[in-house]
Image (spheres, rainbow, N blue to C red):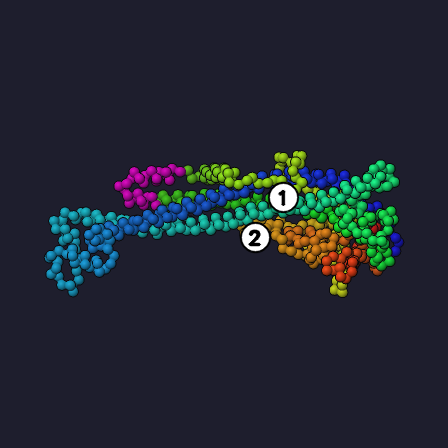
């Protein structure tokens, strides 16, 4: 095979890095300020709305208890009036007597002398008022007691059967609906808060990595100037963090007697480890960092949060609209039931119109059109929100809006929260992307389609693609990367429990980049993945200066062997170890092009 023409390495100088980093800082400051205000406002509005829902349930339950209490009172009054009429259910103090034996004793005590000659075996007939009152002076009063008892009994029976049952059904339906809406709304607010937390964590990870790389780059330039390289005439290039992986201080790098001098290996650094693999010499670089991966996660998290806010706000608006309709229906229904109840009470207590008429006029005179009810609901929510805001200011400290690298950022105050970042594939830290096929070492390994990414920090990342997608070798990198981004899902009325773990997921473990199925990567990308970014973590991360690249046995394949410094218990097997990967492109030309690009980044 013809040797591929070497290409120049993709270099991003320190000034460009700092400029890009400064733009991201300003962007994050504006975003965090705007989204903190939006989240606080949405949370406050939802709490006010939730309090209104509970107030509606309380009002309905209070109306039920009021009507049911009136029924119990009327039933008790009817029984007492009937006992007065019978004259056998009251003792000398006027208390109802329910015990049958006491009733018989009272009957015998209060029996007239003319009635004593009746045999106890003969059934006694009910005495008429005339027979029990002598002159008949109490006849009309006794009859009135019976009529009043019947009226109160009929009223209690009618209200219990028709009015109380309707209020009970209304309360049960309202409680069920409020519970579902409350759970759904709480889930949406919680997911929006989780989305903000995920973006902040992604920013913290990016900021920590970026400051580490920028600090290392600045130290290298300073050391070069102190050694007499302050005047650069072009013959001696300044060290660039993009010409080799971003490194920390030189004390973190070990040297080997077999390492060639820096002038003989442009892609290596003085603090390198050489290892013989095959017929060539591979320079091993330790403590490598790649800013693109954490920057990519931050950009995706921001885009994900924007979509989550869009859908979450839409669902909250639907909840508010649905509950306003339900509140309108509840108030209309409760008004009808209370009017029917008061009409029955009015007919029963005609002697007390001054007490019942004002209440009835107040209920009848209320405006019950939809616009009036919605305006009243809106005013109630606003007033409740202002009250809660006052309470919160007095009981808790204001929410923090600053994070790492966000203090004193120019242009961060004000502005809207709807921001859009470019795709991670448009980042200046990205050198080359392609959909390839990879085959790992092992008897059971097979060819698998992956998204290959070469970064300016001299890393080759391989992203496993989700199963079931139609991406294959040679497909557009944009299509492959889009399949890695998780779909936005917001809790809906159909299912309020699917997002119990968080819209953007919780830490569930999983594989780590550079380690395959789990564990800590030797290339600095160890740690567990979040479920929302499951496919955004590379399955393999190779440090190109530590790799040897050879053309494979087939026309479109090439083999990469990476030398890895053993750590921990693995040191018993030797200082270094290797891992092999076979990669395959669609054509021979693409293979040679990729080999040249990979070697250029070494």
Which residue matches tag 2? Answer: 500
Helix, strand or loop for disc 1: helix
Please report whichever mark, 2 or 1, sits nearer to the chain's N-terminal start: 1
Q: Is residue 365 left or right of residue 302?
A: left
Residue 447 falls within the magenta-colored stretch? no
Residue 365 falls within the magenta-colored stretch? yes
Q: Residue furthest right?
A: 2
Residue 41 appears in the rendering: no
Q: Is residue 8 left or right of residue 541?
A: right
Quadrant of the drawing holding the N terminus: bottom right
Q: Position of residue 152 (x, y in %)?
A: 28, 49
How many other residues sit within 10 Å of disc 2, few (<14), some (14-19) or many (≥20)? few
Q: Report the residue at 61% width, 38% height from top.
A: 34
What separation in Å lies between label 2 and label 1 (alpha carbons)? 20 Å
Q: Which mark is residue 442?
A: none
Q: In the image, is residue 427 above or below residue 494?
A: above
What segment is highlighted magenta in the picture? 341-366
Which residue matches tag 1? Answer: 306
């Amino acid at each position: 095979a013809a040797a591929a023409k070497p290409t120049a390495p993709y270099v991003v100088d320190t000034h460009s890095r700092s400029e890009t980093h400064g733009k991201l800082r300003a962007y994050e400051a504006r975003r965090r300020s705007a989204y903190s205000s939006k989240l606080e406002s949405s949370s406050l509005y939802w709490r006010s709305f939730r309090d209104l829902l509970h107030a509606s349930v309380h009002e309905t339950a209070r109306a039920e208890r009021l009507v049911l209490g009136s029924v119990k009172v009327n039933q008790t009054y009817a029984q007492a009036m009937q006992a007065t009429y019978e004259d056998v259910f009251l003792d000398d103090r006027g208390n109802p007597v329910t015990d049958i034996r006491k009733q018989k004793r009272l009957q015998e005590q209060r029996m007239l002398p003319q009635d004593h000659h009746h045999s106890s075996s003969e059934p006694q007939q009910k005495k008429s008022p005339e027979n029990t009152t002598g002159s008949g002076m109490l006849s009309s009063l006794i009859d009135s007691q019976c009529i009043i008892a019947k009226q109160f009994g009929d009223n209690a029976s009618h209200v219990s059967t028709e009015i109380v049952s309707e209020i009970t059904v209304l309360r049960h339906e309202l409680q069920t609906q409020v519970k579902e809406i409350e759970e759904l709304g709480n889930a949406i607010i919680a997911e929006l808060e989780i989305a903000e937390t995920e973006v902040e964590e992604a920013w913290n990870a990016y900021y920590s990595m970026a400051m580490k790389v920028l600090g290392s780059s600045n130290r290298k330039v300073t050391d070069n100037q102190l050694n007499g390289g302050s005047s650069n005439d072009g013959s001696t290039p300044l060290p660039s963090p993009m010409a080799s992986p971003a490194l920390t201080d030189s004390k973190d790098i070990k040297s080997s007697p077999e390492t060639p001098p820096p002038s003989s290996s442009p892609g290596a650094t003085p603090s390198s480890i050489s290892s013989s693999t095959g017929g060539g010499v591979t320079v091993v670089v330790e403590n490598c960092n790649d800013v693109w991966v954490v920057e990519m996660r931050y950009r995706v998290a921001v885009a994900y949060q924007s979509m989550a806010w869009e859908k979450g706000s839409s669902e909250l608006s639907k909840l508010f609209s649905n509950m306003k309709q339900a509140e309108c229906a509840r108030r209309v229904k409760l008004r009808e039931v209370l009017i029917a109840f008061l009409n029955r009470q009015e007919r029963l207590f005609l002697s007390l119109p001054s007490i019942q008429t004002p209440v009835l006029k107040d209920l009848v005179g209320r405006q019950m059109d939809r616009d009036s009810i919605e305006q009243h609901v809106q005013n109630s929510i606003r007033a409740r929100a202002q009250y809660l805001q006052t309470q919160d200011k007095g009981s808790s400290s204001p929410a923090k809006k600053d994070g790492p690298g966000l203090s004193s950022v120019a242009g961060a105050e004000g502005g809207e929260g709807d921001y859009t970042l470019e795709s991670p594939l448009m980042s200046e830290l990205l050198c080359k992307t392609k959909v390839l096929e990879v085959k790992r070492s092992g008897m059971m390994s097979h060819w698998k389609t992956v998204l290959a990414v070469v970064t300016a920090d001299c890393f080759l990342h391989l992203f496993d693609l989700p199963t079931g997608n139609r991406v294959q070798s040679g497909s557009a990198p944009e299509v492959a990367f889009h399949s890695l981004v998780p779909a936005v899902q917001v809790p809906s009325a159909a299912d309020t429990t699917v997002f119990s773990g968080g819209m953007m997921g919780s830490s569930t473990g999983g594989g780590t980049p550079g380690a395959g199925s789990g564990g800590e990567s030797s290339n600095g990308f160890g740690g567990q993945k979040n479920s929302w970014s499951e496919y955004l973590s590379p399955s393999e991360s190779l440090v190109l200066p530590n790799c040897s690249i050879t053309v494979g046995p087939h026309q479109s394949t090439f083999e990469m062997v990476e030398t890895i410094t053993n750590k921990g218990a693995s040191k018993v097997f030797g200082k270094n170890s290797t891992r092999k990967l076979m990669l395959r492109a669609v054509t021979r030309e693409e293979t040679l092009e990729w080999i040249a690009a990979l070697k250029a980044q070494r």
